[in-house]
Image (spheres, helix red, strand yellow):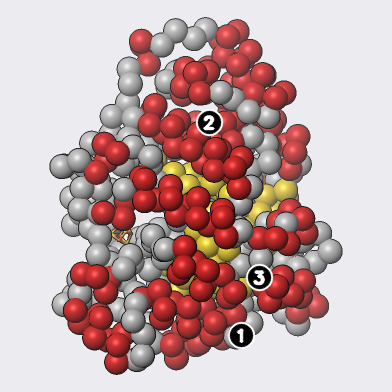
C-alpha cells in the first residue's frame, strides 16, 4: 500500500546534498523543495548519512546531549472506537470479549500504581467517540451520568490529577469545548496528525473507514488547541500509504502550526507495523534505516528546537540510529503498564534505555508529560492549577523531580 516516488527521477549529488543540509543547520529550517529532493534520495546510503549527521548536529547545537523520557502509566480508558483504521488492533467492537471501558475505580487503581513507582504522566489514550457508533456505550455512559466519552474522560483526568499524576490526553478528535473542559486537569494533550494526505481516505486506503482521520478535521483540532493554549503533541505515522511528498507536506503542516501558535511540544515519528487480523496485515513497513532517515528529515524541517520523538518499542533495534539522526526524546515508557496500542511491542526498561542512550553518546533525563522549556518558559500553556502542580513535580531545570517527591532511588532509574 505504501507509495514512494522513484528516487531515480531526482538528481542530487553529494556536494549539493551537503550544501542543503548545511544551510538547514545554519538557518534552523529547511524549505520544502530541498526537503523533498533530499527525502527522495534517502535510499542512497551516502545521502542518508549526510542527512542523519546534519540532523544530529542540529539537535546537538540546541539540545546538547540530553535525551528525554517520560515515566508514565498508560490508561486506555475505552478501546471502543467509531473508526476502523486499516492498521489498528486497539479498537474492539462492544461484543468482543476484549472490549473494555475502565471504571473510575480502575483508573484510580492504575494511578495509585503509577504514583507508587515514581511515574508522573497518566497517559489517557482511547478510541474516538464510541458513543456515536454504539448504543450500548451510550447507555453505559448515561447510566453513570455522562453524556459523552469526553465528559467521562474529564472525570477520569480529574481523578488522575488529584491522585498525584499529570494527565496527558490523546482521545482522538475533540471539539474545542471538550478540550477546554479537559485543560484544567491536563498538562498536555495530543493527536497524531498521521498524514495530511486526503488520499488515505480513499477506498482501499488506511483511513477509508475512519472519518476522524480526515486531515482537515485533525488540522482544525491542532489549530483549536493552539487557540486555547494547550501544550500539544502531534506526529506522523510512517508507512500507511503516504508517499514522500505527502510526508514532507505533513512535516510542513506541523511546522506551520507551531509557527502560528507555538504550542507543538513534540513531533512523534511513529513507524507503522503490519498486524495480523488487520486490513493492512500484508503491507510492508519501513526499514529501520528509513525510519532513521525520516527522523532526520523531521529534525531538518522542524528545526533544532522541536522535540523529535522516536518510540523505542517500535524500532527497538534502531535506538542508536534514531539518536544519530537527531531524535531527542523516547516518549512515554512505563514500568507499570504495557503499550496498549502496540501490545506486541514491549517497552525497554528504563535501565536499558539509559544504557543504550549513554552508549550512543546521550544523557537520559526524565521529563514530565511536558518538556522543561515549556514548564519553565511557557506558563501560558497551562491552567493555573496545572501550573502549580508542575512547580511541585519539576526540578529547577524543569525535568521530573524524583528524590524529594519521596520516590526511592532505584539503580539506573533515578534522574541524572
Ligand atoms: S481512530 Fe485510533 S483507535 Fe480508532 S480505529 Fe483508528 S487507530 Fe484505532
Inspect this view and state whether residue 290 appears. no
**Left or right for 414, reference 123:** right
Q: Earlier in the sequence, mark 3 or mark 2?
A: 2
- In three-dimensional space, the C-alpha distance between marks 3 and 1, rounded to whole angstroms, equals 14 Å
In this rendering, the label closer to the viewer, 3 or 2? 3
In the rendered image, which residue does mark 3 sit on?
A: 383
Would you say residue 59 is visible in this rendering? yes
* Residue 62 at x, y percent in the picture: 75, 38
User: Is 269 positioned to the left or the right of 198 in the image?
Assistant: right
Q: Residue at x 58, y 75 (%)?
A: 185
| Residue at image mark 1 | 162
Looking at the picture, does residue 304 appear above or below residue 97?
Answer: above
Residue 87's spot in the image, x, y percent?
Answer: 27, 51
* Labelled pair 3, 1 in contact (Cβ < 8 Å): no
Give residue 29's position: percent from left, percent from top: 63, 28
Label 3 secondary element: loop
Q: Earlier in the sequence, mark 1 or mark 2?
A: 1
Image location of residue 272, percent across then percent down: 35, 46
> Is disc 2's CB within 8 Å of ligand 1?
no
Q: Which residue was labeled with disc 2? A: 297
Crowding at dot 2, Cα within 10 Å, few <14 / some 14-19 / many 20+, comes out as many
Amino acid at each position: 500500500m505504501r507509495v514512494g516516488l522513484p528516487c531515480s527521477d531526482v538528481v542530487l549529488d553529494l556536494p549539493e546534498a551537503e550544501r542543503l543540509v548545511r544551510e538547514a543547520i545554519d538557518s534552523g529550517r529547511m524549505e520544502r523543495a530541498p526537503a523533498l529532493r533530499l527525502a527522495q534520495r534517502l535510499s542512497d546510503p551516502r545521502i542518508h548519512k549526510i542527512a542523519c549527521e546534519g540532523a544530529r548536529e542540529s539537535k546537538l547545537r540546541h539540545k546538547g546531549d540530553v535525551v528525554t523520557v517520560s515515566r508514565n502509566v498508560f490508561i486506555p480508558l475505552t478501546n471502543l472506537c467509531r473508526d476502523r483504521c486499516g492498521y489498528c488492533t486497539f479498537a474492539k467492537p462492544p461484543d468482543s470479549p476484549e472490549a473494555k471501558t475502565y471504571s473510575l475505580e480502575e483508573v484510580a487503581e492504575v494511578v495509585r500504581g503509577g504514583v507508587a513507582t515514581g511515574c508522573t504522566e497518566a497517559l489517557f489514550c482511547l478510541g474516538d467517540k464510541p458513543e456515536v457508533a454504539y448504543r450500548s456505550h451510550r447507555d453505559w455512559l448515561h447510566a453513570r451520568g455522562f453524556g459523552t466519552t469526553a465528559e467521562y474522560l474529564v472525570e477520569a483526568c480529574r481523578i488522575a490529577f488529584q491522585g498525584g499524576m499529570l494527565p496527558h490526553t490523546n482521545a482522538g478528535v475533540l471539539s474545542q469545548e471538550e478540550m477546554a473542559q479537559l485543560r484544567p486537569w491536563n498538562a498536555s494533550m495530543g493527536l497524531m496528525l498521521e498524514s495530511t494526505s486526503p488520499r488515505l481516505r480513499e477506498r482501499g486506503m488506511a483511513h477509508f473507514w475512519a472519518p476522524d482521520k480526515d486531515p482537515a478535521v485533525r488540522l482544525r483540532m491542532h489549530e483549536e488547541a493552539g487557540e486555547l493554549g494547550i501544550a500539544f503533541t502531534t506526529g506522523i505515522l510512517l508507512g500507511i500509504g503516504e508517499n514522500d511528498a505527502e510526508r514532507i507536506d505533513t512535516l510542513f503542516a506541523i511546522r506551520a502550526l507551531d509557527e502560528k501558535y507555538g504550542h507543538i511540544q513534540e513531533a512523534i515519528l511513529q513507524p507503522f507495523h503490519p498486524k495480523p487480523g488487520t486490513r493492512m496485515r500484508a503491507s510492508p513497513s519501513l526499514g529501520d534505516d528509513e525510519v532513521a532517515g525520516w527522523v532526520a528529515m523531521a529534525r531538518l524541517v522542524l528545526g533544532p528546537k522541536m522535540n523529535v520523538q522516536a518510540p523505542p518499542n517500535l524500532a527497538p533495534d534502531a535506538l542508536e540510529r534514531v539518536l544519530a539522526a537527531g531524535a531527542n526524546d523516547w516518549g512515554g515508557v512505563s514500568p507499570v503498564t504495557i503499550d496498549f496500542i502496540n501490545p506486541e511491542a514491549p517497552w525497554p526498561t528504563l535501565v536499558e534505555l539509559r544504557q543504550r542512550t549513554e552508549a550512543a553518546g546521550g544523557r537520559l533525563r526524565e521529563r514530565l508529560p511536558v518538556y522543561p522549556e515549556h514548564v519553565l518558559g511557557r506558563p501560558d500553556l497551562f491552567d493555573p492549577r496545572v501550573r502549580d502542580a508542575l512547580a511541585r513535580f519539576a526540578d529547577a531545570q524543569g525535568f521530573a523531580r524524583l528524590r524529594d517527591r519521596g520516590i526511592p532511588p532505584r539503580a539506573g532509574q533515578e534522574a541524572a
